[in-house]
Image (spheres, rainbow, N blue to C red):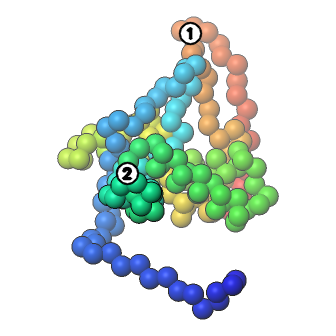
Amino acid sequence: SNHPAATLSVHFGNSASIAGTPDVVAYDSSRGPGVGHVLKPDIAAPGVNILSQGYGSSTGETKHLEFGAVSGTSMASPHVSGAGALLRQLHPEWSNADIKSALMGTARFTNVFLDNAHTQLAQPLDIGAGCLDLSRAIDPGLLLDTPSLSFGQVDVGSDPDPIAVTVRNVG
C-alpha cells in the first residue's frame, strides 16, 4: 500500500439500529414466473433507499461526486454480484453454480413481507429462494448442482422429463 497509515472515518447523524427489522419487498419489484415459464426471481436483495454515489442533491458534475439514497433493481443487483465476488474470493474452487447454490440455499425466507404493516408474507414468486444472507452463504453446508429448478409449463397428465440434482457436502 502507498499509504499504510491511512484511516477512514465515517460519521452518520441521526442513525438508528435496524437489527431485527423485517424485510419488506418493494411494491414495484419484479415478480415471477419469468418469460418461458421459468421460476423467477432466484433471490431477493436490498434495493430500497440504498446510499449510493452519483445521487447527490447538487447539480452538474458535483452531483456525481456526492452520495444519496436511491432505489431499484440497479441497487439490488450489486448486492448479489458483490456477494458472489466475495464467495469467489473465499472459495476459488467453487463453480458459478456452486456460488449460486450457496446464495440461494442459505437465503432467508422467513420474516419477509409484502406490506409495511407486516401482514402479508412474501412467497417464492415474490422473493425466489429468499433474501440474500451472505453470513450464511459463506458456509452453506450443502451445494446443489443445478441450484434452481424449473420444469417449465407442465400440461396436466403429462410426464415431464426428470431433472438430475447433485448434492455435495461442503460443511
x, y (%) of residue 90? 70, 65
Check the picture and name the quadrant holding the N terminus.
Answer: bottom right
Q: Secondary structure at mark 1?
A: loop
Q: Please state which of residues 117 and 5 is positioned toward the viewer in this rendering.
A: 5
Residue 164: assigned label: none
| Residue to which mark 2 is pinned | 70
Res 107 seen here? no
Q: Please state which of residues 61 and 5 is positioned toward the viewer in this rendering.
A: 61
Residue closest to the far front: 60
**Residue at 72% in and 47% down:** 96
Amino acid type at circle 2 is: Val
Vertical order, 52 against 33 (above or below): below
Residue 155: assigned label: 1
**Residue at 65% in and 13% down:** 159
Q: Please state which of residues 124 and 53 is positioned toward the viewer in this rendering.
A: 53
**Residue at 60% in and 91% down:** 5
Vertical order, 122 against 131 (above or below): above
Q: Residues within 10 Å of mark 2 (few under 14, many from 20)?
A: some
Vertical order, 2 against 107 (above or below): below
x, y (%) of residue 136? 55, 61
x, y (%) of residue 3? 64, 87
Q: Earlier in the sequence, mark 2 or mark 1?
A: 2
Amino acid type at circle 1 is: Asp
Instruction: Classify residue 122 by image quadrant.
Output: top left
Check the picture and name the quadrant holding the C terminus.
Answer: bottom right
